[in-house]
Amino acid sequence: MSERMTRELALNALLAAVWRRKPEQEVLIHSDQGSQFTSHDWQDFLKAHRLVSSMSRRGNCHDNAVAESFFQLLKRERIRRKTYTARAEARADVFDYIKLFYNPKRRHGFNEQLSPVEFERRHAASRQTV
């Protein structure tokens, strides 16, 4: 989280994801057409890490429905119920929501009523048996 959505913030987040996940195959990275995602630094980073860029059409929120759905849930289930006194408090609360609830516990209708962590675990296990 930051006061502004900068190229550095986006690159640091993507670097953290690549470092944690260590993808072995090409991965599709979907974004909107914000300046941070159209920058040369962003595009160079994608190429260097075998990531493939996918961008929403200008002004079309439906192209990024998964992200829009997530942020709607985050706001409805957590943020709208709170008043934060400092950015650090908001950052910690959003981190807890994602890391301790949304990913490991929150069930999703589209994922067979599984949490994202469990859905991914089952998907990975099914790929190993093939």
Image (spheres, helix red, strand yellow):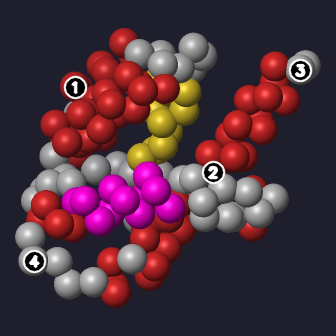
Magenta highlight on residue 120: no
Where residue 87 sits, quadrant-wise, is bottom left
- Image: 129 above or below 5: above
Say if 107 sits above or below 29 in the image.
below
Residue highlighted by disc 1: 41
Q: Closer to the N terminus: mark 4 or mark 3?
A: 4
Q: CA distance from mark 4 to mark 3?
A: 50 Å
Say which amino acid is labelled 2.
Pro
Q: Reading the chain from its start, which is encountered first: label 1 or label 2?
A: 1
Residue that mark 4 sits on: 85
Could you give the CA–CA distance between mark 2 and mark 4, rounded to whole angstroms? 30 Å
Q: Main secondary structure of the magenta part?
A: helix
Q: Earlier in the sequence, mark 2 or mark 3?
A: 2
Q: How far apart, in angstroms, are the residues tagged by discs 1 and 3? A: 39 Å
Residue 39: x, y in percent? Answer: 23, 34
Q: Earlier in the sequence, mark 2 or mark 4?
A: 4
Find numbered disc 4 in the image and state the secondary structure of the residue it sits on.
loop
Q: CA distance from mark 2 to mark 3?
A: 20 Å
Among numbered discs 1 and 4, the one appearing first in the sequence: 1
**Eyeballing the image, is 93 above or below 81?**
above
Q: Nearer the viewer, residue 27 or 62?
A: 27
| Picture layout, residue 52 above or below residue 4 | above
User: Which stretch did the figure color magenta?
Assistant: 91-101
The residue where tag 2 is placed is 116
User: In the image, what residue type sits under mark 3?
Assistant: Thr
Residue 83, percent from left and from top: 20, 84
In the picture as drawn, the residue positioned furthest to the right comes out as 130
Report which residue position mark 3 lands on. Answer: 129
